[in-house]
Image: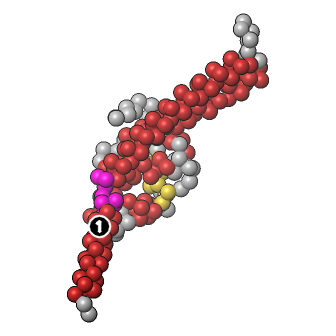
Amino acid sequence: MKLRSILRTVARQEAAGVGEAARRAAESLRHDPRVQDAASRLKARAGDLGGQARARADEHLERLIERRHTRPGEAVPDDVAAVLAQRRREREARVAMARARAALIAQGETPEQRRVLTLLADSTGWAGGQAGTLRYTVLLDRLAPSGDPAAEMAIHRALWTLAERRVLAVSPHGEVTACELPVTVEVRG
């Protein structure tokens, strides 16, 4: 075997080892609660900005529709007014759900609690999520996929702290549901 062939083989093996180490590091960072908390906050902020842009676009579209279907000095036709009123109700419902989602997630005091509440909001209809059941074991599997006892204990602690504060409820069958929010909840930014 020539020296050149040996050097190529060694270089390939070292490159593969470095790539594998980088993949392992990226995987461990992806499951770090601080990284997930920062990512969820960025995602929520992007969602807020997108919602604000959609609301402005809807209002602008409604003004254009009103102008198009009315003549100066005349009232908006009943069918157009009904469609516009329906659009406004739907938009207000979306805004209310977004506020409820933000208020629910804001109940979390630690990154683990916020991660639990984010998943819970995703399965809570009144918080803008897909209505469905979320099981305790599914929460553990998604938030502590490594099975690390310390990570699982942090999630257990977050769940039971939130349950004691009546932010969520856990049924005897393991279903986790969000409790209705009090009327005077402050959203921390």
Q: Nearer the viewer, residue 186 or 53?
A: 53
SS at badge 1: helix
Q: Quadrant of residue 8?
A: bottom left
The image shows residue 121 at horizontal and vertical percentages of 47, 47
In the image, residue 115 sits, relative to residue 96, either above or below, namely: below
| Disc 1: which residue | 22
Q: Does residue 135 appear to the left or right of 93 in the view shown? A: left
Label 1 is placed on what type of residue?
Answer: Ala
Residue drawn at 46 percent across, 44 percent down: 179
* Residue 31 falls inside the magenta stretch: yes
The quarter of the rendered structure image containing the C terminus is top left
Report x, y in % for residue 119. 44, 52
Image: 88 above or below 2: above
Residue for point 72% across, 6% down: 73
**7 on left or right of 81:** left
User: Local crowd at mark 1 within 10 Å, few (<14), some, or many (≥20)?
Assistant: few
- Residue 188 horizontal/vertical position (percent): 34, 35
Which secondary structure type mostly characterizes the magenta part of the structure? helix
Q: Give the range drawn in magenta.
A: 28-35
